[in-house]
């Protein structure tokens, strides 16, 4: 069986219509912890995506911030530039998971004007959002939505927080932290009965009643 082909910086530069110097300048975005040298086909795809993001007007710092956020949000992804379908709309990098390496009904938007990039996942057909999503990825998406919901609540956006937390439960209906934060949301919205219901649900998911132990 023939060995896998590799590509030099000059090969990639010729394929993409850029200079070898540009390829070397982008190296750390494609291979954050590796030495320069020969690149795989997957890394060639990553360089192609990077070129498209640069052509859309994103600077290196913004691209790095987006990639860092993706790696934190989806630790199972080892090469976001090659694994996901990325494009730019205005000031946002859109990660189209439906057309990318994983089949997920949604888009992850990274708002790059914030000091810390903020993830917003916009559902496409949200009632079916959690169906057919691999377990590990569903858990990551549930956590991402719940984290955003918590941030929105702390910022005083209770209604937006509710939407994100409910999306978290589409991916993982047993995710107790989402129920707990929803209880806080309904408390903030002046709905104490609903808040009590969600606290009870959170306790049920965690497997305890909140009462005195027997």
Image (cartoon, rainbow, N blue to C red):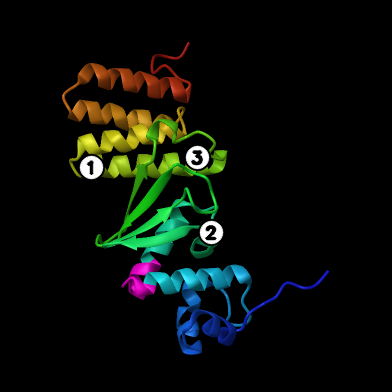
Q: Earlier in the sequence, mark 1 or mark 3?
A: 3
Identify the residue shown where x is 50% and y is 40%: 138
Name the residue that disc number 3 marks.
138
* Residue designated by label 1: 154
Q: Which residues are magenta?
A: 54-64
Q: Secondary structure at mark 3?
A: helix
Labels 1, 3: front one: 3
Check disc 1 and report its element: helix, strand or loop.
helix
For this view, does 159 lie left or right of residue 122? left
CA gap, disc 3 to disc 2? 17 Å
Name the dominant secondary structure of the magenta segment: helix
Say whether residue 59 is magenta.
yes
Q: What is the x, y in percent for residue 4?
A: 73, 72
Among all residues in the image, which is located at the extreme top?
A: 214
From the viewer's perspective, is 14 left or right of 146? right
Judge whether residue 20 is colored magenta: no
Disc nearer the start of the sequence (1/2): 2
Q: CA distance from mark 1 to mark 3?
A: 24 Å
């Amino acid at each position: 069986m023939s060995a896998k082909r590799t590509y030099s910086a000059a090969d990639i530069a010729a394929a993409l219509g850029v200079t070898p110097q540009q390829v070397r300048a982008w190296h750390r975005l494609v291979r954050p912890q590796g030495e320069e040298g020969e690149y795989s086909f997957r890394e060639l795809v990553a360089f192609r995506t990077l070129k498209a993001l640069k052509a859309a007007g994103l600077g290196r710092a913004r691209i790095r911030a987006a990639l860092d956020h993706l790696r934190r949000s989806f630790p199972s992804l080892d090469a976001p530039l090659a694994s996901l379908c990325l494009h730019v709309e205005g000031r946002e990098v859109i990660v189209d998971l439906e057309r990318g390496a994983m089949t997920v009904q949604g888009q992850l938007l990274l708002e790059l004007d914030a000091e810390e990039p903020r993830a917003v996942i916009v559902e496409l057909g949200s009632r079916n959002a959690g169906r057919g999503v691999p377990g590990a990825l569903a858990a990551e998406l549930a956590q991402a939505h719940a984290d955003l919901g918590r941030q929105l609540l702390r910022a005083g956006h209770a209604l937006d927080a509710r939407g994100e937390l409910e999306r978290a439960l589409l991916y993982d209906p047993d995710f107790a932290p989402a129920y707990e934060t929803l209880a806080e949301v309904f408390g903030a919205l002046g709905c104490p009965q609903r808040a009590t219901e969600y606290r009870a649900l959170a306790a049920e998911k965690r497997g305890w009643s909140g009462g005195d132990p027997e």
